[in-house]
Image (cartoon, rainbow, N blue to C red):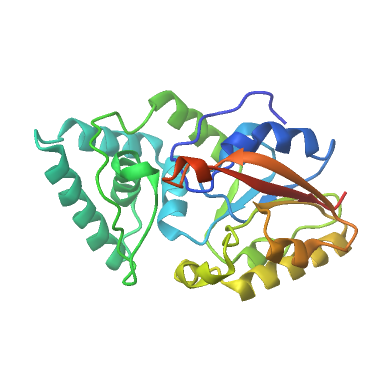
Amino acid sequence: MSNSSVAPFVKWAGGKRQLIPQIKERMPEKYNDYYEPFVGGGAVVFEFLPTNALINDINKALINAYKQICNAPDAFLKTVNKLDEEMWEDGKKYYYSLREHYNDKLMKAEYDVELAALFVFINKHCFNGLYRVNGKGLFNVPYNNSRRASVDENAIMEISKYLQGVTIIDGDFEEACKDAKKGDFVFLDSPYAPLLPTSFESYTKEGFDIDSHKRLAKLYDELTARGCYCMLTNHNTDLINELYGNKGYKIDAIIVKRMINSDASNRVGEEVIICNY
């Protein structure tokens, strides 16, 4: 385990940066391999830089960015810096032209260095760093009116160096954990359970519905039976308490600031951290 950490290269909705201190104090003192089936922006893996790590996410464009930064950091930096340098006077028009090009490449499944550069540029120049697609799978978040640099070159090189030793995959969370064994640590930053039971419809297009939450809880039980150390984070909702309560797991509720809600009075919520050790 290295002592340093690196800065994530994208901002991700539901990212765990503000929970790092609480996660840190609850991590097992010793573990073998590290598994993170919902890596997102990587706030946790980049904070702790565990050796023998496997990271996974269902978002292929996100995982392509990890792979390109790992395998071709120079080409990635050259491409993303060029996107920054060539920005037109009319930033908004430029952003929408790149977003359209990005979506064309997505539709053609062109998972290459250019897509990775577009992905990071768009993440840095879209509203709230939100990754959201419509029913057709097209990225549709508006421009945030900034002209800032898309990357920190030093951070990208450090990330690239770290990722050389990491297994990077883009599949189902269950598949990602299939080799986890006794003494390994599995960190599950699961997609949020909706705060209101009625808002499940809006979640299904992300592909994480109520059945996925049940399947994840079953996996948590199986990993526990295998002797893995498991830590799971989510909103403190009835569904989550139903799925994980009364099983002897340690459930800690933590007050957090929610950035996504536009109404300031609703910006405080409770997250839970659930550990099986």
**Relative to the observer, which residue lies in front, 187 or 133?**
133
Q: Nearer the viewer, residue 263 or 223?
A: 263
Would residue 236 appear left or right of 18 to someone viewing this image? right
User: Residue drawn at (70%, 63%), measured in percent from left and top?
Assistant: 238
2 shown above or below 223: above
Identify which residue is drawn at 46% across, 46% down. Answer: 260
Quadrant in the picture for residue 117: top left
Q: Is residue 248 visible?
A: yes
Where is residue 19 drawn, in percent x and y?
A: 64, 37
In front: 76, or 146?
A: 146
Q: Is residue 185 visible?
A: no
Q: Quadrant of residue 208?
A: bottom right
Report the quarter where the N terminus lies. Answer: top right
**Residue situated furthest bottom in the rendering:** 211
Query: Residue, x 75% and y 47% (percent of image)?
Result: 33
Q: Is residue 45 left or right of residue 114?
A: right
The answer to whether 99 is drawn above or below residue 3 in the figure is below
Residue 251: x and y, percent?
80, 51
Find residue 20 and report its horizontal and vertical position in percent. Answer: 65, 34
